[in-house]
Amino acid sequence: ELVKNISGLVDLERELKGLLKLERVIVVPGDSCEDETVKQEMGAVAAKTLSSLVNPGDIISVAGGSTLARMANMAPKKTKDQNNMIVPARGGLGERVEIQANTVAAELANNFNCSYRMLHVPDEVSKESLNTLLLEPKVNEILDLIKNANILIHGIGRAEEMAKRRGLSQERVSSLLDKGSVGEAFGFYLDKKGGVVERVNTVGLTLEDLNDINKVIAVSGGSDKSEAILAMLETGHDDFLITDEGAARKIYNLL
Ligand code: F6P
């Protein structure tokens, strides 16, 4: 197999931006699946990028996961209140509290010196319970904010890893994989072409809602995640990609 080689990260960023039709691609050196400090660096760059893209009054929607949790940790302290609001992108997705979207929203808001709301909807609830929850004014109030987000920042995971992390049965993991799932983002399991294989039954942003969001930022790295990242990018919803060299070189070779 011919390995397309490209030397500098700036060239790699430019090539990927063109090939993937993105507004901007940022590649940090290293491979976060081998080196934890690379994930930290990716988080720092993501936080800085987000900070530079936020306008006063913007509603920022955030996903969960370890990468986004890092982003919130590393976010620069803002002193001026710019009337921003941070909300989780969706309800519970089966993550540990430390890396849930609710926690990311609270921590980021603390650093950005702005307000936040949490969405207390458990993951994988029945349709019936979801409908009942949707009758709650408080839940609706937050969903309204979520649906009006101007910016979304989200992670991307490998379908298999995410299904296991969420404690799905071996049977359901196999079924997801048999149906071609390779990637996952905010509760949507995606195939190679960006088609939705399955979604976690919760409330909040759907893929279609992303059409109305001005700036959609994906933050995900690690050479093991190249296929997953590409699956999400295939949906055509992202504007910005913040990744690492490990993933970027592999993605480039998949194109
Ligand atoms: O579960 C929330 C989530 O954002 C998923 O949508 C995504 O696949 C995952 O976290 C990414 O997690 P990590 O950054 O830990 O790889």
Image (cartoon, rainbow, N blue to C red):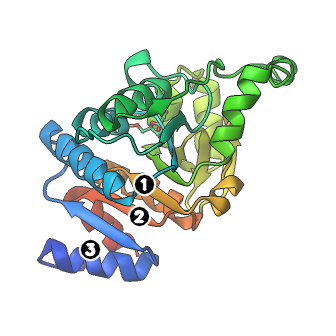
Residue 198 at x, y percent in the picture: 69, 42
Element class at badge 2: strand
Disc 2: residue Cβ within 8 A of ligand 1's nearest atom: no
Q: What element carries label 1?
A: strand
The residue that disc 2 covers is: 240
Q: Which amino acid does label 2 sit on?
A: Phe
Identify which amino acid the numbered label 1 is placed on: Ala
Residue named by callout 1? 218
> Is 148 rendered above or below residue 12?
above
Residue 1 location, quadrant: bottom left
Q: In this view, does 41 lie to the left or right of 123?
A: left
In the picture, measured across the screen, residue 14 lies left or right of residue 126, that is: left
| SS under mark 3 | helix
Position in image of residue 242 (x %, y %): 32, 58
Query: First in sequence: mark 2 or mark 3?
Result: 3
Camera-side residue: 25 or 124? 25
Where 53 falls versus 221 (above or below)?
A: below
Along the line of sight, which residue is nearer the eye, 55 or 194? 55
Residue 10 visible in this rendered orientation of the protein:
yes
Q: Residue shown at 86%/18% (left/top)?
A: 132
Q: Residue 13 carries which label?
A: 3
**Is 193 or 137 nearer to us in this picture?**
137
Q: Tag 3: residue type?
A: Glu
Q: In this view, does 105 lie above or below 18?
A: above
Q: Can residue 201 be seen in this view?
A: no
Query: CA gap, disc 2 to disc 3?
Result: 11 Å
- Residue at point 51%, 50% (across, down): 58
Closer to the camera, 93 or 34?
Answer: 93
Circles 2 and 1 in contact, beta carbons < 8 Å: yes
In space, the residues marked 1 and 3 are separated at their CA atoms by 14 Å
* Ligand 1 closer than 8 Å to label 3 CB: no
